[in-house]
């Protein structure tokens, strides 16, 4: 019974509220109608009425002034016409009255200072002189069409004088409409005030009804809202965490997981055993760290390697904590958080590797400097033997071989020194052949040792490029190293297809000229599934420990930084073609 009465009261309150809403809407619309339609309409009516008065007054004056004349002149103003003008000014309460000739000369004005002035404004010639009445409302303290500052609200009206459809002159009449306008403004203010007061009353009544209605269901809504907000907050926190989170019961069943779990595992793990979801077999792991958490009730941390559905591997740091306990304090569920530390480990490895390379670079530079001096001595001694007149042809041949070997060692030393230098260098104008020669000087021996044939075709006519030579050399070394790896993986022994081909050419693209270098090998190739990922940081299709996944990423960044492009074309098991485009130096165009 009480519930029925409450529902009936709510129905009455809602009905009254709806009636108030409709009433408030009607009052608001009437106020807007009053301001935006009625007031402008009355203002327009006031202007038309005043303009009609001006036309009637001028027609009366015209009969006195024009008579049988075809043009207005100063002679048109006799004592009778002057008296008539003054009577009309007083009767119609005009502020000013002026008479113009056909050419715009002021023939008469109630203000004598205006007589003789010429009206040269466009509206006089284009509107009034063509027989049309021209009206302008001039607000108080502003200037009229002729630049006269008015001290009241004025309707400025120009009325043409026509005789037999010929323009003979014009009247200009200044009507003071301040009183009429004030009456209209007062009427609008009163009506608007009444409507506004009514609207406020209705609004207050609506607010009272609204709060009365809200009070009947406030507690229930607050409780529902608090519960919903609590659930949303918890879900938002858990879903925003970039780590994989699962909740396990004592039987190792996954009772809850966040969205990241489905992304990493490739399935919805809820309802599955943890070892099934992580593809670790059909039975619990022998040394289960989570099980220890159930047994001892303590947190546990350990590292785990996960293979994702796309074949990529992740290093995870797992933290298991008790989520809920029974009344006796025994763990009922455990929450496990898996954090991806793959990038962190790669960065650590790369940092260590960078330190090693820096040490090797310093060592190489030191060794190179130590080798340079004896090599120079060997070469000089060989040259002295050749220069001796008593040297036999056999001795000369041996000395030339010594010089050739010494010069080769010196070239290798120069390349080592160049590679060990700091990378902070400015771009220089260099031929692509020079960079490639330096790169091959560091790798050619290893390439030959692997039984790989090297074919290089770089025309001498290729224009020069403006680059940081050491960085481009780093790119070439990385590409050549990848080609070597692919060929050695496919051909363990010497083979006719175990070849690295390097070709150069110039191409035009997007209105620019580029130097193009193509590296081609018939090694293992690259799968189409990963071809678009090979330049991603830390992506590698080599076995763990054999690649950092940074080589091509850094190479692409270097080429982009030089305004070039790096392209890959490959068929798995068939070939790989790497294309490097670098813009021709502006100096080559004479710019």
Image (tube, helix red, strand yellow):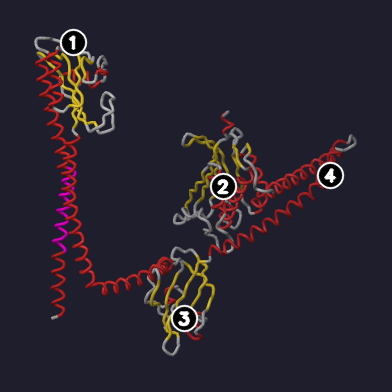
Name the element at disc 3: strand
Sequence-wise, the earlier of marks 3 and 1 is: 1
Work out how far the residue at label 4 is from the one at label 1, CA to CA, in angstroms: 121 Å
Sequence-wise, the earlier of marks 3 and 2 is: 3
Residues marked 3 and 2 touching at CB (< 8 Å): no
Sequence-wise, the earlier of marks 2 and 4 is: 4
Work out how far the residue at label 2 is from the one at label 1, CA to CA, in angstroms: 91 Å
Task: Report the disc number at residue 73.
Answer: 1
Assess disc 4: are there few (<14), some (14-19) or many (≥20) residues with their C-alpha within 10 Å of its C-alpha. Answer: few
x and y percentages locating residue 39 in the rendered image:
16, 41
Outermost residue to the bottom = 328
Sequence-wise, the earlier of marks 4 and 1 is: 1
List the residue tagged with mark 2.
Answer: 558
Give, as a single range, the part of the protein colored magenta: 17-36
User: Which image quarter is the C terminus in?
Assistant: top right
- Please identify, in this view, whether the residue under mark 3 or under mark 2 is nearer the observer: 3
User: Which image quarter is the N terminus in?
Assistant: bottom left
Assess disc 1: are there few (<14), some (14-19) or many (≥20) residues with their C-alpha within 10 Å of its C-alpha. Answer: many
Q: In this view, does 194 lie to the left or right of 233?
A: left
Assess disc 3: are there few (<14), some (14-19) or many (≥20) residues with their C-alpha within 10 Å of its C-alpha. Answer: many
Residues marked 3 and 1 touching at CB (< 8 Å): no
Q: Quadrant of residue 547?
A: bottom right
Residue 165 in the magenta stretch? The answer is: no
In the image, is residue 346 above or below residue 484? below
List the residue tagged with mark 4.
Answer: 377
- Please identify, in this view, whether the residue under mark 2 or under mark 4 is nearer the observer: 2
Residue 30 in the magenta stretch? The answer is: yes
Q: In which quarter of the image is residue 209?
A: bottom left
Magenta stretch, main secondary structure class = helix
């Amino acid at each position: 019974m009480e519930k029925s009465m409450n529902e009936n009261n709510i129905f009455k309150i809602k009905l009254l509220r709806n009636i108030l809403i409709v009433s408030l809407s009607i009052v608001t619309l009437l106020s807007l109608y009053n301001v935006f339609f009625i007031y402008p309409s009355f203002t327009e009516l006031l202007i038309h009425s005043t303009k009609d008065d001006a036309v009637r007054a001028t027609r009366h004056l015209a009969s006195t002034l024009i008579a049988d004349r075809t043009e207005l002149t100063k002679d048109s103003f006799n004592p009778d016409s002057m008296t008539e003008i003054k009577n009309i000014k007083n009767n119609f309460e005009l502020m000013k009255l002026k008479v113009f000739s056909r050419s715009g000369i002021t023939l008469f004005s109630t203000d004598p200072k205006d007589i003789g002035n010429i009206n040269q404004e466009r509206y006089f010639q284009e509107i009034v002189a063509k027989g049309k009445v021209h009206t302008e409302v001039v607000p108080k303290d502003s200037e009229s069409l002729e630049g006269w500052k008015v001290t009241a609200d004025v309707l400025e009206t120009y009325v043409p004088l026509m005789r037999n459809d010929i323009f003979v002159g014009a009247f200009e009449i200044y009507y003071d409409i301040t009183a009429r306008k004030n009456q209209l403004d007062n009427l609008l203010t009163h009506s608007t005030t009444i409507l506004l007061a009514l609207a406020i009353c209705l609004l207050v009544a609506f607010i009272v009804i609204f709060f009365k209605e809200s009070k009947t269901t406030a507690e229930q809504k607050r409780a529902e809202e608090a519960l919903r907000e609590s659930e949303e907050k918890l879900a938002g926190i858990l879903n925003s965490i970039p780590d994989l989170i699962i909740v396990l019961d004592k039987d190792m069943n996954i009772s809850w997981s966040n969205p990241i779990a489905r992304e990493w595992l490739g399935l919805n793990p809820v309802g599955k055993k943890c070892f099934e979801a992580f593809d670790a077999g059909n039975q619990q792991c022998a040394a289960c760290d989570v099980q220890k958490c159930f047994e001892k009730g303590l947190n546990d941390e350990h590292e785990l390697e996960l293979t994702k559905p796309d074949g990529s591997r992740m290093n995870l740091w797992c933290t298991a904590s008790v989520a809920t306990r029974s009344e006796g304090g025994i763990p009922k569920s455990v929450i496990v958080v898996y954090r991806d530390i793959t990038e962190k480990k790669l960065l650590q490895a790369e940092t260590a590797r960078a330190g090693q390379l820096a040490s090797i670079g310093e060592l190489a530079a030191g060794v190179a400097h130590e080798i340079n001096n004896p090599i120079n001595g060997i070469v000089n001694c060989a040259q002295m033997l050749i220069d001796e007149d008593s040297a036999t042809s056999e001795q000369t041949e041996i000395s030339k071989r010594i010089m050739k070997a010494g010069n080769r060692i010196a070239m290798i030393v120069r390349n080592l020194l160049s590679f060990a230098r700091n990378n902070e260098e400015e771009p220089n104008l260099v031929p692509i052949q020079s960079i490639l020669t330096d790169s091959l000087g560091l790798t050619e021996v290893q390439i030959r040792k692997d039984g790989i044939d090297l074919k290089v075709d770089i025309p001498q006519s290729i224009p020069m490029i403006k680059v940081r030579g050491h960085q481009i050399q780093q790119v070439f070394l990385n590409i050549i190293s990848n080609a070597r790896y692919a060929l050695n993986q496919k051909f363990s022994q010497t083979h006719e297809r175990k070849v690295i081909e390097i070709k150069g050419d110039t191409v035009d693209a997007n209105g620019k000229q580029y130097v193009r270098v193509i590296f081609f090998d018939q090694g293992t190739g690259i799968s189409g599934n990963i071809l678009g990922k090979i330049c991603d940081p830390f992506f590698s299709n080599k076995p763990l420990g054999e690649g950092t996944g940074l080589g091509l990423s850094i190479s692409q960044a270097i080429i982009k930084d030089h305004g070039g492009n790096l392209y890959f074309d490959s068929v798995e098991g068939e070939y790989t073609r790497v294309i490097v485009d670098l813009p021709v130096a502006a100096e080559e165009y004479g710019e």
